[in-house]
């Protein structure tokens, strides 16, 4: 990947998608939300969306997490989020959500998608990527990506 004429990341498409080096690259190769987090025990980190498991142990207390739409799932035990908008695609739906002050997108099965205006609970499943650096550049709510659809 090139940015401003400089090589910023080399690798297979899967490597670039799964292990981006900065929030801008993460958003460019697929919808992503960057969140500040704090390390916990082992590969655990906490952020505005609760506790997430990291793909690799973190070396510092503060970190930046990449949260893509697919691992954000509806879960009665998760954090509360407001459904701002629903884009229905049949087999799935993109939900634009606000959890506290965090804007993000979740992909859920289309037939079970909540309606705009609903309050849901969400969590991040699986392992998440952490980025080098200490401060994410968060996008405003209107800039949250729906994963390219």
Image (cartoon, rainbow, N blue to C red):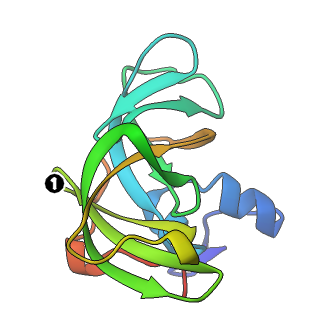
In the image, is residue 4 above or below residue 63? below
Residue at the image point whose x is 30% and y is 41% from the top: 79
**Splitting the image into 4 quarters, where does residue 8 fall?**
bottom right
Where residue 98 appears, x then y in whole percent?
Answer: 23, 61
Where residue 48 appears, x then y in whole percent?
Answer: 28, 40
Considering the image in quadrants, where does the N terminus appear? bottom right
Where residue 111 appears, x then y in whole percent?
Answer: 56, 76
In the image, is residue 67 above or below residue 89? above
Residue at the image point whose x is 50% and y is 72% from the top: 31
Work out which residue is located at the far right of the displayed protein and give it.
Answer: 12
Considering the image in quadrants, where does the C terminus appear? bottom right
Instruction: Looking at the picture, tell me which residue is in the foreground, 62 or 81.
Output: 81
Instruction: Looking at the picture, tell me which residue is in the foreground, 61 or 67.
Output: 67
Instruction: Looking at the picture, tell me which residue is in the foreground, 66 or 61.
Output: 66
Residue at the image point whose x is 51% and y is 78% from the top: 93
> Is residue 134 in view?
no
Would you call the spot at circle 1 few (<14 residues within 10 Å), some (14-19), or many (20 or more)? Answer: few
Q: Secondary structure at mark 1?
A: loop
Q: Which residue is mark 1?
A: 101
Where residue 34 appears, x then y in whole percent?
Answer: 39, 54
Q: Is residue 57 left or right of residue 60?
A: right
């Amino acid at each position: 990947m090139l940015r401003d004429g400089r090589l910023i990341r080399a690798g297979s498409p899967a490597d670039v998608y799964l292990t981006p080096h900065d929030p801008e690259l993460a958003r460019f190769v697929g919808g992503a939300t960057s969140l500040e987090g704090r390390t916990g025990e082992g590969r655990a980190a906490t952020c505005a969306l609760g506790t997430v498991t990291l793909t690799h142990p973190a070396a510092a207390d503060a970190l930046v997490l990449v949260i893509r739409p697919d691992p954000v799932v509806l879960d009665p035990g998760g954090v509360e989020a407001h459904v701002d908008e629903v884009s229905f695609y049949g087999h799935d739906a993109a939900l634009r959500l606000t959890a506290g002050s965090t804007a993000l997108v979740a992909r859920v099965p289309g037939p079970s998608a909540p309606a705009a205006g609903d309050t849901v609970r969400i969590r991040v499943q699986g392992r998440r990527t952490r980025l080098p650096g200490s401060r994410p550049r968060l996008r405003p709510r209107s800039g949250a990506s729906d994963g390219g659809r």
